[in-house]
Amino acid sequence: MKLFFVSLGCDKNLVDSEKMLALLSRHSLEITEDEREAEIIIVNTCSFIQDAKQESIETILEMAQLKKEGKCRVLIATGCLAQRYAGELQKEIPEVDAVVGTSAYDEIVSVVESSLLGEKKCVLKSLDYLPDGLTDRLQTSAAYTSYLKIAEGCNKNCTYCIIPSLRGKYRSVPMEELLSEAETLALNGAKELILVAQETTVYGIDLYGEKRLPELLQKLCRIDGIEWIRLLYCYPEEITDKLLSVMKQEKKICHYLDLPIQHCNDEILRRMGRRTNKADLIEKIETIRRVLPDAALRTTLISGFPGETQKDHEECMEFVSRISFDRLGVFPYSPEEGTPAAEYGNPVPEKIKRQWADEIMEAEQEIIFRQNETMTGKKFQVIVDGYLPDEDIYVGRTYRDTPDIDGCVFFQAGYEILSGDFVTVMVTEARGYDLIGEICNEEEM
Ligand code: F3S
């Protein structure tokens, strides 16, 4: 029987998708890339902001249409939208045979089986539950770069964020399970491991009574085959000296930190429920840059949080240029039903939110272009992501670039190299967000 699987949303959701696919592929299901020939269709959904919900609903409706037309016998919605709107989905889209919540994805095989027998199912487990022992993955993307989800849920309860009600409280995956999963990924060809969670920096606090990210990183560095380890979703206030010192000592850990700060104004941070302030943010960033002078810092911001004024926005613009983040993303605020911030007064008009987001991105663009100019003449270790045959050019990334969200390096080689290989490239030119370079021969390294 053929299965078509759509994974929407974030990299954390992608890991759940790959775990479900591993379970399903053991049950003689063949995975197809053509939805029209699938008898079973699963959509792993996102419900983070309005646009993400819209995309999930449209995808389910598209798949429901296929079910009406013929081949598809079973349509299942899993993940965050399914968790949040389980009843509504089954009521409004009768073609949906089953919904599976975020902590129940380990039930996917039995849900498929019962759906094939014509049963309608809704499986929502307690959000305190964490499926265990699922260390197998069926990777949907290139094996050399793999995400490792080190925890589920979040305890921060930022006032704008719906994720704690979709994913529950913070639950760390036991360290031995993560090591076993990472070893299997490495055996299957993983060279770059990207650690993800709603927040990676407090890893271990629930299980071991203390933050154990530094220890986890040290152990992951001992795994043969893993060459790069990258950390995403680090809360600045949780970054410790110990973490920075392990990042400095361990050669495999990329000097890259993703710090989702959302804003810098103290009053906005307070109303967002963030546990930091502008002075502490500046101090932490200065510490990071003192310990790791070559660190690439990424952040995300929200524009137009309720009550934000033009003056607050200008303060944020000033902060962005003062810090000179190496990478940055900004999202216009989207009120999420069920969150405290959705009840706040003083909404910012949609047009202004978008205008502020554009202004921040324009300011950041100048910073990135300027920084990229300073890369000319420097040599970087680059992981190869692909080859563009028409231009005879390879595409890769430095330690400063997370796949799909940051920039690339384009270079010619004169001989064949494979995706996932590491090479040394000297940057010869900056071109916008990207770099152009030349491969270095061994004697030039
Ligand atoms: Fe991720 Fe979207 Fe859920 S961002 S955690 S899939 S709401």
Image (cartoon, rainbow, N blue to C red):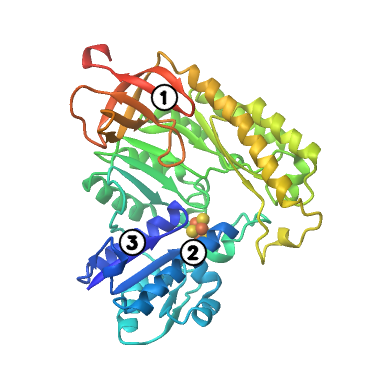
Is there any visible trace of residue 86 in the rendered image? yes
Question: Which residue is painted at 41% across and 66% down in the image?
Answer: 43
Taking the image as shown, residue 47 lies to the left or right of residue 436, namely: right
Q: Crowding near pointer 1: few (<14 within 10 Å), some, many (20+)?
A: many
Q: Which mark is residue 435?
A: 1
| Picture residue at 27% right of the left edge, 17% below the top | 440
Does residue 146 sit above or below 407 in this rendering? below
Mark 2 surroundings: few (<14), some (14-19) or many (≥20) residues within 10 A: many
Q: In the visual, does 204 lie left or right of 158? A: left
Q: Amino acid at mark 2?
A: Ser
What is the C-alpha distance between the residues marked 3 and 2? 20 Å
In the rendered image, residue 258, in percent from the top left (x then y), is placed at 52, 39
Task: Quickly name the residue at label 2.
Answer: 56
Q: Residues within 10 Å of mark 3 (few under 14, many from 20)?
A: many
Rendering quarter of residue 177:
bottom left
Question: Residue visible at 40% across and 80% down?
Answer: 97
Q: Is residue 124 above or below residue 207?
A: below
**Sooner in the amino-acid sequence: mark 1 or mark 3:** 3
Please state which amino acid type lies under the numbered disc 1. Leu
- In the rendered image, residue 72, in percent from the top left (x then y), is placed at 31, 76
